[in-house]
Image (cartoon, rainbow, N blue to C red):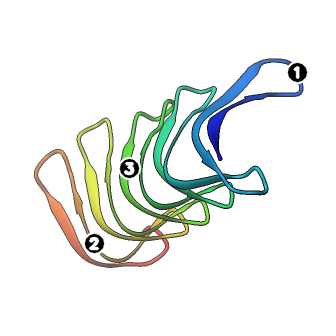
């Protein structure tokens, strides 16, 4: 199944607009799908069972950070690169939306921090 889903919030304000494939349960599902959120954020990539899953890119409308990498059950999980508006970036392993495992944080000043990360620290 393929199509467009427009989600309205209970107060009638436009919410999300999703373009892509759906599974037999009507959930977002497939290798290529894009969701535009009410806050200006955009996710483009793989979906499984209604959640971000697989490779994808997320541009946050609120914080302006950009994440390109792996997703599992809606969370950043696996290898990914996140670029922050101040010029910093983190490249490495993620788990539960936090730095977790081997990775490097590059500060805009040129300093780098490499090593094993746990819970975002």
Which residue sits at x=18%, y=45%?
108
Residue nearer the viewer, 45 or 22 = 22
Residue nearer the viewer, 49 or 67 = 49
Q: Position of residue 78 (x, y in %)?
A: 41, 72
Vertical placement of residue 11 versus 102, above or below: above
Q: Quadrant of the C terminus?
A: bottom left
Query: Which mark, by number, is residue 103?
Result: 2
Query: Which mark, by number, is residue 11?
Result: 1
Q: Are marks 1 and 3 in contact (CB under 8 Å)?
A: no
Disc 1 crowd rating (10 Å Cα; few below 14, some 14-19, many 20+) is few
- Cα distance, mark 2 to mark 3? 14 Å
Vertical placement of residue 121 versus 59, above or below: below
- Cα distance, mark 2 to mark 1? 42 Å
Q: Position of residue 103 (x, y in %)?
A: 27, 72
Earlier in the chain: of badge 2 and badge 3, it is: 3
Left or right, residue 118 beside residue 112: right
Q: Position of residue 116 (x, y in %)?
A: 32, 81
Query: Which type of secondary structure does the marked residue at label 2 adopt?
Result: strand
| The residue positioned farthest toward the left in the image shown | 110
Disc 2 crowd rating (10 Å Cα; few below 14, some 14-19, many 20+) is many
Q: Are marks 2 and 1 in contact (CB under 8 Å)?
A: no
Q: Are marks 2 and 3 in contact (CB under 8 Å)?
A: no
Query: Which type of secondary structure does the marked residue at label 3 adopt?
Result: strand
Residue nearer the viewer, 112 or 67 = 67
Task: Report the number of discs.
Answer: 3
| The residue positioned farthest toward the right in the image shown | 10
| Corner quadrant of residue 15 | top right
Query: Which mark, by number, is residue 72?
Result: none
Which residue sits at x=38%, y=50%?
67
Q: Which residue is mark 3?
A: 67
Q: Position of residue 50 (x, y in %)?
A: 68, 54
Earlier in the chain: of badge 2 and badge 1, it is: 1
């Amino acid at each position: 199944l393929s199509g467009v889903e427009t989600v309205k919030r209970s107060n009638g304000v436009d919410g999300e607009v999703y373009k892509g494939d759906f599974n037999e349960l009507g959930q977002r599902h497939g290798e290529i799908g894009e969701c535009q959120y009410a806050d200006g954020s955009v996710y483009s990539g793989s979906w499984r069972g209604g959640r971000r899953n697989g490779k994808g890119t997320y541009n946050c409308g609120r914080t302006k950070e950009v994440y390109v990498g792996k997703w599992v059950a809606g969370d950043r999980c696996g290898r990914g690169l996140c670029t922050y508006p101040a010029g910093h970036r983190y490249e490495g392993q993620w788990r539960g939306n936090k730095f977790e495992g081997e990775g490097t944080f590059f500060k805009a000043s040129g300093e780098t921090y490499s090593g094993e990360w746990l819970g975002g620290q």
